[in-house]
Amino acid sequence: MKKISVIAFVLLMIVSPLPLFADDGMWTFDNPPRKQWKERYNFEPSDAWLEHVRLASVRVEGSSGAFVSANGLMMTNQHVASGQLQKLSTSERNLRRDGFYASTSAEELKCPDMEAHVLVSYEDVTARVQGAAKEGASDKENNEARNAQRAAIEKESTDKTGLRSEVVALYRGGEYWLYRFKKYTDIRLVFAPEEQIAFFGGDYDNFTYPRYCLDVTFLRVYENGQPLKTQNYLKWSAQGPTDGEFVLAIGNPGSTNRLLTLAQVQFQRDLGNPLQMQVWNSRREALLRYSATGPEPARRALNTVRSLSNSIKRLVGQQDGLNNQRMMLRKEQDEKALRAAVSSRPEFQQAYGSAWEEIANANRELPTYAKRSAFSTIAYSRLGQIASTLVRYSEEVGKPNEARYEEFRDSKLESLKFNLFSPAPIYADMEEAILASWLADAQQALGADDAFVRAALQGSTPAALAKSTVAGTKLGDVAARKALFEGGAEAIKKSDDPLIMLARRVEPIIRDLRAWNEEKIQSVETAAGQKIAAARFAVLGRNVYPDATSSLRISYGRVLGYEEDTTLVPYKTTYSGLYDRAVSFDEKPPFDLPQRWRDGKAKLDLSTPMNFAYTADTIGGNSGSPVINRNAEVVGLNFDSNIQKLPNRYWYVDEAEGGRALAVHSAAIIEALRRLYGAEKLAAEITGR
Amino acid sequence: MKKISVIAFVLLMIVSPLPLFADDGMWTFDNPPRKQWKERYNFEPSDAWLEHVRLASVRVEGSSGAFVSANGLMMTNQHVASGQLQKLSTSERNLRRDGFYASTSAEELKCPDMEAHVLVSYEDVTARVQGAAKEGASDKENNEARNAQRAAIEKESTDKTGLRSEVVALYRGGEYWLYRFKKYTDIRLVFAPEEQIAFFGGDYDNFTYPRYCLDVTFLRVYENGQPLKTQNYLKWSAQGPTDGEFVLAIGNPGSTNRLLTLAQVQFQRDLGNPLQMQVWNSRREALLRYSATGPEPARRALNTVRSLSNSIKRLVGQQDGLNNQRMMLRKEQDEKALRAAVSSRPEFQQAYGSAWEEIANANRELPTYAKRSAFSTIAYSRLGQIASTLVRYSEEVGKPNEARYEEFRDSKLESLKFNLFSPAPIYADMEEAILASWLADAQQALGADDAFVRAALQGSTPAALAKSTVAGTKLGDVAARKALFEGGAEAIKKSDDPLIMLARRVEPIIRDLRAWNEEKIQSVETAAGQKIAAARFAVLGRNVYPDATSSLRISYGRVLGYEEDTTLVPYKTTYSGLYDRAVSFDEKPPFDLPQRWRDGKAKLDLSTPMNFAYTADTIGGNSGSPVINRNAEVVGLNFDSNIQKLPNRYWYVDEAEGGRALAVHSAAIIEALRRLYGAEKLAAEITGR
């Protein structure tokens, strides 16, 4: 879409398909960019090649990973696995801080609630889902009809195949696909490095390049109590990529907003993002206050603090992009060009022309709704989330499958229970701190007379209410959750668990807000989005890619440095640079090294490449993506982007603008395993020698 | 001046002197910032301390250096000495590329035309110079009177003391000082590293930090054929500075424009700088075309290409500052505040109030003049410069001393001859290439009908004229220059040397332009500048510093990292980082290492600090400045600034804005001398052990 002038658009209508000018795109496996691959990189993968890398790819913890041995060994980032590392840790055994290595399978530690999904098949169900909408029905009715159809398709598929089945909406409703996943729930920790080397430089170096992080973890997927045997694993490239080499990344990018209209993007800039920032800051500050009460609280809160800091820094970068007039102007011109192409043909104008205004009109209602919606929740405390889920489930489960909220459909219940009944530790003091701070912030943001605030507090103070509900609840006990879950609506209604009572009180308000949003915003956006998608297909052909939706994608690009501040930034970094950066700060945190790394410097070949930068189109959710060469060998492990790339939620930040994805170099992983961690056996399993 | 609001100004008039808010200032030794030193760093140097560091400081090659042993050993940058290295090199012996070390004094190489100046005394002659101006005389007449007075003072001093004597104008004419220098002309090369390590990263890493350059050269000053014996040398700090440490830099910053009015700065932004850029680009492109003809031409042109690239990159950074609306607004507000303070008191307004408009009016005439002035010269070729100097000298020397152009006064003649009669090699093919390109560019810039172009070419083409004049000239021969110099006006007039004839033809045009500039611009700016300086003293007291004028200054600040792109940049770098950067680029030029460094990696302690960043106020000309701690020990050798600092020609770029001076760390120098260069003897002389 980018860089296409009005004139080019007019030309395109004659000479389509659209020639792209950059390595952009998070492509679905049903529509890989074969043309670009061939023309630019002389790359023509077979269907078997594509199937192989798809089946070797894993969705895990909302992010990505890949099989790297025939024995179910899975690679992802330390920061993707860090929630599990946290849950496996105690005040005595800190796996996040100190790392872990199981040299035998008996020593491997089972993750309390990790799931891995492999996309085994997909089929186009667009006609069936879109066909559920009826001429003359309201947007809301059609939305419900489509959702019901999606639920029915998922249920049919699950019943027939036993596989986890999801109907994913692509192109903002332009297409619907049924994805079927093989699901694994017995996943065991094999290796994690010290967090200080996985996340060297901390929040400062997050979204920074040059970079020096060994952000890797190895887990093993088990099936029926045995390591998974699979041929769908990626081989290892010991030497990694050369400068300029063509590479691909496979993973599950979470969310992009490139197909949004200008009005929607402006809303995000002016209202959505500032509100999101307020919420994240509120949550982080609460956790930092709690962390400051002692080392054990700090340890408990660290994972969420780190995740929020990451989100906040990312959002700042995104806002910088939206505030960049040049970039925003391009977005404006793109939309203008598409609308001009639509209005230039009466049949297009008739079918799609109204969509942009429909969205702009709907968005005008958002300001009053958005803040209430953002603050009306108790789910930022883990116990609050459990209580809300139980209350909501008890109401939803009584409805026909297709009439339920999406997350309570039959196809999702297994994963829901897996999460709900997780034995992962819950810390009452942290829960109380989070809930008290959150309610206080909600009270301040919404005012004491707000419906949610009144229902939640009932005249009490946030601190007092948080104290009494957390002290009185039994939801910390998995058995208590199971009893309420199985007891259904009746058990929930009768429960005098104070947290369930709190969740019951606020539930009608949350439901009202959700209904309002679904009717006034989502229904309109989906209906209009479908029109815009159709307009885009009509004008540009099918050589376009959908927004990211946490579904499996393949991206591509080159390993490449860039120019910054009038100098060059290299395509890779080395272990020498790690030691330079640590010593240059006199090892002041967060630039300190783990003792193993300080002591082991002489054992390492310091010329070993550590991280590299590449141009592929990725975003959050691609963490843990394997970076592979044209032979489908692992040359790296994606773990981050540089700061220049952050506006790529809204548009691809191209080569010249310096946007880069960042990966751990394959050679760095093997060098560290062999020389510093005594993990020769693991290195041999990975490299095959 | 910066950051002072109008209200603060009004307050200041009651509570002056001005409190400064940053470590800014290139202070003269007669007015060091004792107050700031004491308040901020508890530093109270004695007069003897100040005299010691002044007498240890050297002006050399328009830049800086310092004595670092009792035997006349002088330290400066490799890039400051590189012109001499170039002149000492031949196609067989490339000292720039390969470096040099003389382990005995017999091996030391005498530089062909290097001078070193030490400021041995200074006195205030403001009253005498300013007193030369008469009420009622024109600006031009007063300017001539002041200049004559300056010449007379210089001559008196030289006659009396035998020392090189200069009357320097400070505060844009607010003060005049007589500076007396001890001059040395027998300077011998002791040590230079390979240029590839002195200038690692080339033009890309110029003005960049983090940085990895060993930009150092050692020379020895001789007197009467013997190494100079001196007690005025700086001792060495082997460990260098700590993070945050207070340091000082002493040197000869070339030029700043901070006291210019807003109109003058805007002129530079809109006309002066773009024109300068055009001239430098024209010159660099000519040399690059010449360089492309072979390795020997490339070697011959390298020094000037490097110098021009440096100037161009610096100018880009300066323009970025001028185009920064926030910074420019501050300049505007500062001027507004000063003018408000002046106009608030009738006697100030009467004495100084008109100055700003006088300058603005004069500047309005500049556009037509500026381009002609920039292109009407033949002095960018060395032979052209010699010819112009001889022609101009022959005319000037017949005038009374005080009526001559400044550079031809008696006090300057010795240095003039030293340069004119230098035995340094001149390459005819390069001379011809430079002259041809320059005349072609002048023709294009000014048009074929321009007076200079017509006088220079006389209907010939630039290429033909350059060919014939360079082929026919005898000025490559030092004896021929001497004959013409000694022959005076008559010899010049009669000369049929084609280059002298060319210089004679263009001389009247160059003189006219210079006269116009002196009358219409300089005289007005000096008269008005004197008023503004007086206004500034009246409003702010004497706690202000003058613009840089290539005269000796002392700056101070802290060794300090900074924040950039949301991460931290460390206060120092290490040898590890050098190897990281080289390997990260696969050692592609300009990130390749000299063979000695590639082979010698294992001999080095890679944790040795290499460069560091500090906040002192410096600018071009400070290259080679010693960076010292409060004990007057060398902790580093200034060699550059980062890109953030470049707008500091116009205003100090403070700590928070990330502006930093860059220095070679004292430990890096000793480590390299000892471990890689086998220069144990030199290291021992420097460190005293």
Image: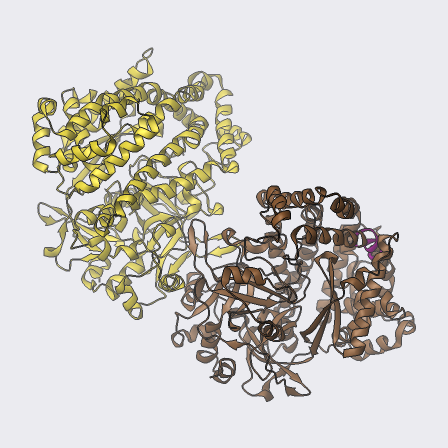
Chain colours: A yellow, B brown
Question: Looking at the picture, does residue A437 appear above or below residue B90?
Answer: above
Residue A360, image quadrant = top left
Closest to the observer, A101 or A98: A98
Does A288 sit left or right of B20 as displayed?
A: left
Q: Is residue A610 magenta?
A: no
Q: Residue at horizontal 23%, vertical 34%?
A: A463
What is the x, y in percent for residue B339?
69, 44
**What stretch of residues is rendered in magenta?**
B514-522
What is the x, y in percent for residue B107?
59, 86
SS majority, magenta: helix
What is the x, y in percent for residue B271?
71, 47
Does A469 sit left or right of B442 as displayed?
A: left
Question: Looking at the picture, does residue B678 appear above or below residue B270?
Answer: below
Mark count: 0
Task: Say if residue B129 shows up in the picture.
Answer: yes
Q: Residue at horizontal 34%, vertical 50%?
A: A630
What is the x, y in percent for residue B313?
60, 56
Does B261 sit left or right of A532 as displayed?
A: right
Task: Say if residue B426 shows up in the picture.
Answer: no
